[in-house]
Image (cartoon, rainbow, N blue to C red):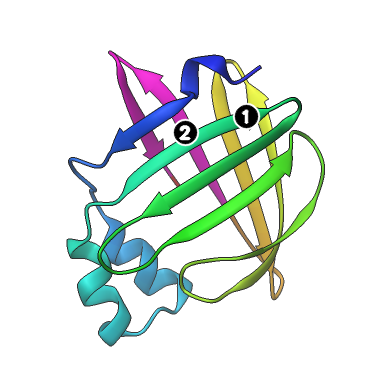
Amino acid sequence: MVDHLLGTWKSTSCENFDAYMKELGVGLATRKPGKLAKPSMTISADGNMVTIKTKSAFKNNEISFKLGEEFDETTPDERKTKSIVTLENGSLNQVQNWDSKETTIKRQVVDGKTVGGV
């Protein structure tokens, strides 16, 4: 399942995050502290339920889901999305849909570190 992703991971860098947030329509007042945050992400599993907890000085967020099943999500920037997470080639792929828009977040382990991208 997602065993290779389980644990707590600390963000050390985040390229183009401000541009990504701007594209989503996130205002400058929220983007500024958001791009400075160095969140930690804890991925855990209980049976077939996966939980991702993201914590930072700016905002905390938690989602729980079953792989391949759609769920309602409120993102840290307050978007209400229909999301689905799948596991493909070792990558945890999260697709968020809202207001006829879509974004995909990919999380994987490379050289012992989690790498995320959109």
Above/below status of 77 relative to 91: below
Image coordinates for residue 29, horizontal then vertical, percent:
27, 86
User: Residue 109, which numbered label?
Assistant: none
Q: Counting other residues with Cα less than 10 Å from the Cα at mark 1, is it few (<14), some (14-19), or many (20 or more)?
A: some
Q: Secondary structure at mark 1?
A: strand
Q: Counting other residues with Cα less than 10 Å from the Cα at mark 2, is it few (<14), some (14-19), or many (20 or more)?
A: some
For image coordinates 64% across by 56% down, the residue present is: 96
Name the front one of labels 2 and 1: 1
Above/below status of 56 relative to 9: below
In the figure, residue 94 lies in which quadrant? top right
Where are the magenta residues, as a range? 104-117
Dividing the image into 4 quarters, which one contains the N terminus? top right
Amino acid type, label 1: Ala
- Residue sitting at the far right: 69
Residue 15 belongs to magenta span: no
In the rendered structure, which disc, 2 or 1, sits on the residue that comes first in sequence? 1
Residue 110 belongs to magenta span: yes
User: Residue 107, which numbered label?
Assistant: 2
Task: Pick the residue in front: 68 or 118.
Answer: 68
For image coordinates 48% across by 48% down, the residue present is: 53
User: Residue 45, which numbered label?
Assistant: 1
- Residue sitting at the far front: 46
Image coordinates for residue 48, horizontal then vertical, percent:
76, 28
Task: Pick the residue in front: 88 or 77.
Answer: 77
In the figure, residue 27 lies in which quadrant? bottom left
Q: Secondary structure at mark 2?
A: strand
Is 88 on the left or on the right of 41, as rendered? right
Image coordinates for residue 104, horizontal then vertical, percent:
56, 47
Image coordinates for residue 26, horizontal then vertical, percent:
40, 78
- The rendered magenta stretch, by its main secondary structure, is classed as strand
